[in-house]
Amino acid sequence: MSYLQNLDLAVQSWYPLGGRGYNLEMMNDPLIKDLAIKYQKSPAQIILRFNIERKVIVIPGSKDRDHLRANLDIFDFGFNAEELKLLAGLDRHEKHDWY
Ligand SMILES: NC(=O)c1ccc[n+]([C@@H]2O[C@H](COP(=O)([O-])OP(=O)(O)OC[C@H]3O[C@@H](n4cnc5c(N)ncnc54)[C@H](OP(=O)(O)O)[C@@H]3O)[C@@H](O)[C@H]2O)c1
């Protein structure tokens, strides 16, 4: 990702919340849940904020009006360096789609 960003290319998160039917695993991660409690946000907001902080575009999909509102309410908090490192450590280096 940093390779692309260093070339001034924008990176977008594809399925930022894990995709339809697949987001429970991400939202139930213990670190995500702990940060949600600390910052009084939902797990989805923690995930979206993490991507914004590392300059990754997120376009979460939702049919739920409350979720749509919550997904925009991520600009009043931020993670410290240690938390960013822990969140980055969740990367499992898995590739889920082929293009
Ligand atoms: N062009 C394409 O062919 C294509 C294909 C796939 C993906 N994409 C990209 O992926 C984006 C989103 O794809 P996606 O909607 O499949 O995956 P996603 O955004 O990763 O996940 C959507 C799921 O998350 C749930 N959700 C959303 N906000 C939530 C919240 N605040 N709390 C709890 N659950 C929440 C939604 O349920 P609710 O409806 O209940 O909120 C839905 O089940 C697209 O906008 C696009 O950028 C594009």
Image (cartoon, rainbow, N blue to C red):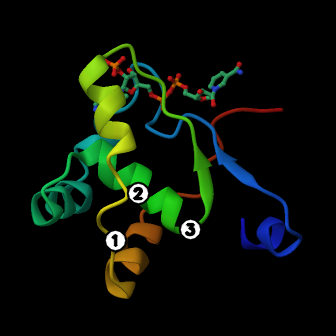
Q: Which residue is mark 2?
A: 49
10 sits to left or right of 46:
right
Q: Badge 3, how many Cα within 10 Å: few under 14, some, many 20+?
A: some
- Residue at 35%, 53% in the rendered image: 74
Q: Is residue 91 something that shows in the picture?
A: no
Farthest-out residue, bottom:
81
Q: Residue at x 36, y 32 (%)?
A: 23
Disc 2 to disc 1: CB gap under 8 Å:
yes
Distance from disc 2 to disc 1, alpha carbons, whole Å, reads: 7 Å
Amino acid at circle 3: Arg
Counting other residues with Cα less than 10 Å from the Cα at mark 2, is it few (<14), some (14-19), or many (20 or more)? many
Query: What distance separates the C-alpha of mark 2 from that of mark 3?
Result: 9 Å
Q: Position of residue 84 (x, y in %)?
A: 40, 76
**Left or right of 60: which side holds 55?**
right
Q: Determine which residue is flagged by label 1.
A: 78
> Looking at this view, is 72 or 38 the one in front?
72
| Residue in view at x 61 percent, y 56 percent | 56
Compute the Cα span from label 1 to label 3. Answer: 11 Å
- Is 17 placed left or right of 46 in the picture? right
| Quarter of the image that includes the N terminus | bottom right
- The quadrant in which residue 78 appears is bottom left
| Residue 31 quadrant | bottom left
Q: Position of residue 82 (x, y in %)?
A: 34, 85
Q: Which mark is residue 54?
A: 3
- Regarding residue 68, the answer to whether it shows in the image is yes
